[in-house]
Amino acid sequence: MKSLLAVCAAALLGGGAAQAQKINAAGATFPAPIYQKWFGEYHKTHPGVEINYQPVGSGAGIKQLTDGTVDFGASDMPMTDKQLADIKVKPLHFPTVLGAVVLTYNVPGVMGDLKLAPDVIADIYLGKISKWNDGRIAKDNPGVKLPGEDIVVVRRTDASGTTFVFTDYLSKVSPEWKSKVGASTSVSWPGQTLSGPQNAGVAGLVKQTPDSIGYVELAYAITNKMPYATVKNAAGAWVRPALESVTAAAAGAAKNMPADFRVSITDAAGKIAYPISTFTWMLIPSHIPDAAKAKAIKGFLQWMLTDGQKEVEALTYAPLPKEVAAKEMKQIAMVQ
Amino acid sequence: MRLRWRKFVSALMLSASGLCALIAVSALFVILAFLVYNGSKSLDWNFFTQLPKATGEVGGGMANAIVGSLQIVGMASAMGIPIGFIAGVYLSEFDDKHFASLVRYTADLLNGIPSIIVGILAWTLVVVPMKHFSAFAGSVALAVMLIPIVTRQTEQFLREVPMALREGSLALGASRWKMIATVVVPAGSKGVLTGIILGVARIAGESAPLLFTALNNQFWGGMNEPTASLPVMIYYRAISPFEDWHRQAWAAGLVLIALVLIANIAARMVLARGVSVPRG
Amino acid sequence: MATAAAQARAVKKAPQTGDAIARLLALIFAAIVLLLVVLVVFELWQGSAASREKFGWGFLTSSVWNPVTEEFGALPFLYGTVITSLVALLISIPLGVGAAIFLSELAPAGLSNALTFMVELLAAFPSVIYGLLAFLSLVPLMRSRVEPFLKHTLGFLPFFQGPAFGVGYLTASLVLAIMTFPFIISVSRESLLAVPREQREAALALGATKWETTWDVVVPYAKLGIYGSIFLGLARALGETMAVTMVIGNSPAVHASLLAPGYSIASVIANEFAEASTKLRAAALVELGLVLFCLTIIINGIARLLIVATTSKGSKR
């Protein structure tokens, strides 16, 4: 009986060893649609490389990178100085795409796009605006029949880069938000909120729950045919989250990109800039002991910055500005 | 008159208890009905043969999750069954007063530990030192859950083997371990097998301990890799907003329930066919 | 050429070493079970050290869960875990005991066995399947029909106020009720069946109705086993993870209304453990695990005592 077990164990263990270079990554759900598409495409054209990406949230991605349980991470929030201090092998930040955090909602009777001003959004999430037909929402949306129901506020359960981008924006437009709550991947949310794990979880809850509002990446709202709000930007213009407005938000940063690529582009200046836009980063360790893995990852990065960028628009992400991509190409050499 | 009232109350309350039983049993059928209705709409050949597609894309299947579950549960069984079985033999045959009571108590404790805590244990013991998620870590977690089930079932069914059989074997000159191996174990084998089948079916459906041990994988996993599994896939698919993913969650749920039902019915049949020896 | 005595001695010796090895082997494997529990306790204790040192006993009464300021408290999760389990029992005890009474006193043996088998099948269903059904089928039903109805009729009570989200304490309790009543039915039925026939016959002979016999004679006789089954169900409900996580709403605060979203210990661990990047947060989660572990040990312990007391009582009489 014992020898049979030994054979079984060997067969099971042996089954795991394969020819392909297997790489494990985990992190943000924000870019998950495009990342998983990329990794699938890349595997088709380069069958020797298999990158398994698990969308577990930016916070989990950073933690797993710090613990060393994944080969690289992904996050919509650039790592803080403290997080960088805690990690043994310093990671390099590689921006991959530009995306938009949109306010998606499920208001029975409202088919079109609602206009939500920055202070309105902050006060909804602070719990100060509690009904859909509140005067401040109605003011910006004349002609729209808003129900008198309570607003069901949905947010992320898990430590999320999307949450960071959203709260970073709210901190910039609402001093009360900044002092009361702050910006981070996980915050203490005021009032009574529902929460779901990952972008998909928030979208799922908003989709099922009438009178709800939630913040998700644009791709999730579009794929699920959910409406999303038009937001007023820093220049005072009402902007729809879209390719052009997201790219415009990155224009300033593209010119003044810091060397480590850590930058926030929320509430960007610019007439057509969408105020809740963000880069999202892959966190690649600066030193990868396994030479074959390092080679595979570097190969992927090069593909991502050239061919990969061509595929992003189909999924409603915006490609990286050319200057940024060029700078990143140089950073690839820093991965040893 | 008082008697009429009492008889009325009696009939009423007993009917109420019948109603309770009806509700309880219909819960089973309602749940199965939902699963069969929603799941069978979504089960197709692709489900069993294709890998999952990227977030948001329609199509794909759960071939890797099915194989992954088989790998993880298989390895967990390979580790957990022998340990549980021999521990059960110890409790039944070598019952040393205090130590055996202690082991019995801790087996029950282990059985009652919430599955998420077993997940924490496996994460600390396997994932962190190995520096990556793996099907093996998931197997360790599931094995920890399987061991107490097999231990208690083995002990229970071996105890039921009549003393007469043991004494007869010893009288014929067999050594203790030979007696156990050739007489007691075969006699109690049906019950023990039942316990093992039910235990394996139970761990096959566990999702929580795999969340941060085996994680998940879009591609084929392996003992040394993060691996997809049916229960974890069901979880992530169900809470998403994508209709196509809901479809897949139902299909996977149906497959999982079918496995659980088959195992439970098979176990019952094994047991019902009568024990190998007449009960003394 | 060995003498008969020497041969006899040789035969006697050989099985003994084989036995000694077998015993040792079995002992070692049994000790593994012990070792595993020790490991669990050790890991929970060690892993929660940072949190225990910082918050002390106040951890159990604080309802703050703030990852930014790094203040953590267990109260919302304890509250959620306990309240959902208690409401679940409120539903499943009458249902379970009632069904057990039917199955042991009224149903003919064949039917009783068949129905019990079906009910026990429910206990074998994985948690994530209950979660799947609850999230996709029960939650919309709760939100659109059941909760508004409760608000309409019982809305004057603080338990049924607030918006009807669909997810929340009540839905989680319902799911837990379905998951616990198989245990109550199964064990209670066994306890009721173990009551000697003489007891029933004596009561009937004295002129009691069937119900009076059942309720006033049989059930009290079996009450220890019934209580044991309740504690068994409670222990299961406290530790349930997946089904609860999917429908409780994941809100780390204490809410009076059952319609409100809440959180349970197992759920917060499942959601946040993989991403607890600071030592203190990870320790707080492990400490929550320790609290849950202690709770389940106590409840399981009580259940065992009650059930063992029944079986010994039954055999004595």
Image (tube, rainbow, N blue to C red):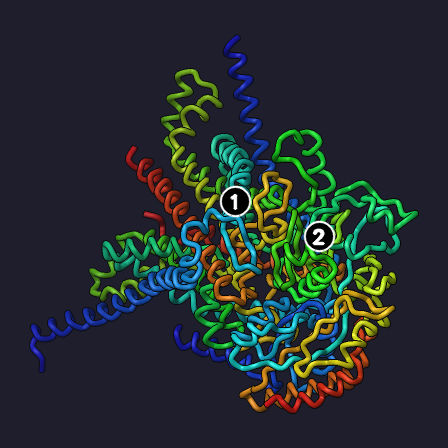
Between C16 and A270, the one nearer to me in the picture: A270
Chain holding disc 2: A
Residue C52: percent from the left, percent from the top?
41, 57
Identify the element where label 1 is drawn: helix
**Marks 1 and 2 belong to one chain:** no
The quadrant of the image that shows the C terminus of chain A is: bottom right
> Where does the N terminus of chain A fall, quadrant-wise?
bottom left
Identify the residue at image location x=75%, y=50%.
A212
Report the amino acid beneath label 1: Tyr
State the separation of the CA atoms marked 1 and 2.
25 Å
Marked residue chain, label 1: C
Where does label 1 land, which residue?
C79
The spot of residue B69 in percent (x, y) is 57, 67
A72, above or below C44, in the image: below
Seen in the picture, residue C123 relative to B125 is either above or below; the reply is: above
Between A136 and A175, the one lying in front of the other is: A175
